[in-house]
Image (tube, rainbow, N blue to C red):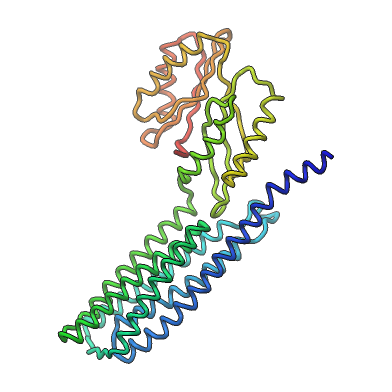
Amino acid sequence: MEEKKTEAVQDRQTEPITGAAVSRDKVIIRTSLLGILVNLLLAAFKAAVGLLTHSIAVVLDAVNNTSDALSSVITIVGTKLAGRRPDKKHPLGHGRTEYLSAMLVSALVLYAGITSFVESVKKILHPEKASYSVVSLVIIAAAVAAKLVLGQYVKRKGKEVNSGSLTASGEDALFDAILSASVLGSAILFMTTGLSLEAYVGVVISVMIIKSGVEMMSEALDDIIGHRPDPEITRKVREILTEEEAVRGAFDLFMNDYGPDRYYASVHLELPDTMTVGEVDPLTRRVQNKVFQETGVILTAVSVYSYNTTNAEAVRVRDAIHEKVMAHDWVVQMHGFYIDTEKKDLRFDVVMNFDIDPKEGVLQICKEVQEMYPDYRITVVPDVDLAD
């Protein structure tokens, strides 16, 4: 009977991850394939129009569509590689591969933007007269409409499955629609007034593409380097943990990101000093399971702070020290306070912001608290401001 119960718990913890991952990958791949098809068709039509009308702006717009299609190919490859099962060499999976693919996409966009800028400047220095037709204008207008629809769809799908690559592609497509509309506007202006601004429009398009590439690369670098977790997730995890009656606080929530929606975390819980290991163990297992079921975050470690429940003096001392410590503007939080009045020992943790060196902060706090309670041995542990 015990064996069956263990298997059931294990199933609940593994099936949602596998099922969700497969469904997510399918959405990303299907959406990316659609993007490839639409962008290749648009690129072909725009390239034909650009070459026939001698319009550098339209040709560059076609190049942009081609780079978008190639970006979708890289997104698919990155998604397939990231979805591989964990192995001995990579026990936490390959999810971060998506961030590398996003870096490649951003580099490709950046290259396309720089190349387009160079060609546009050449056309300004050595202009060629464009010759638009009504058919070419209709094709460009249809391309604008297609990009608007594609952008909205891809962006929505990206948000649904929390895919940074898809969301960025959707935003890029919407932006491309605006750029294509500017090309259309310059063509209409040329046909009605004879004023040719298309090479200058090409420069604007190029600058915008470069800007988009830089922003995409910056986001990919943030994911690779590691950044502050989403405040909504950390708030939800803390809410679940502090719903337990015995838990007075949840601190030092440290979340590691191993790919989109793949979080492994650790946390400190503040519990009464009267609780036994036999009581703490089921509590930690219970909150680990609940956090996973409701957020998908896997709590790999739950450590414990104890707080005084039978010593009235402890409350007075804690409040006095709290007031002194929190008076510093570089202190974010104080927690994990415990005092042993018999052994003359007190300890607590302090979260400091990034305006001060942790060693300097600890020395200053230790000195101040020691002056308040010279008979005590003071232990101050510095914590990093990891999450909101």
Identify whether 37 is placed above or below 228. Answer: below
In the image as oriented, which residue stretches furthest toward the right? Answer: 1
Q: Position of residue 40 (x, y in %)?
A: 46, 80
Q: Tell me where residue 288 appears, x and y as whole percent.
A: 63, 38
Where, by quadrant of the figure, is residue 167 drawn?
bottom left
Look at 57% across and 64% down and name the residue there: 79
Residue 224 rendering spot, x and y as whole percentages: 49, 54
Report the label total.
Answer: 0
Looking at the picture, tell me which residue is in the foreground, 179 or 294. Answer: 294
The N terminus: image quadrant: top right
Please tell me which residue is depicted at 41% across the width and 76% down the height of the picture: 65
The image shows residue 315 at horizontal and vertical percentages of 48, 13
Q: Nearer the viewer, residue 225 or 61?
A: 61
Residue 306 is left or right of residue 229, and the answer is right
- Residues 118 and 292: in front is 292
Q: Is residue 236 above or below residue 342?
A: below
Image side of residue 137 versus residue 17, left or right: left
Q: Quadrant of residue 187?
A: bottom left
Q: Residue at x 57, y 29 (%)?
A: 269
Q: Residue at x 49, y 8 (%)?
A: 375
- Image quadrant where one finds the C terminus: top left
Left/right of residue 297 with respect to residue 320 in the rendered view: right
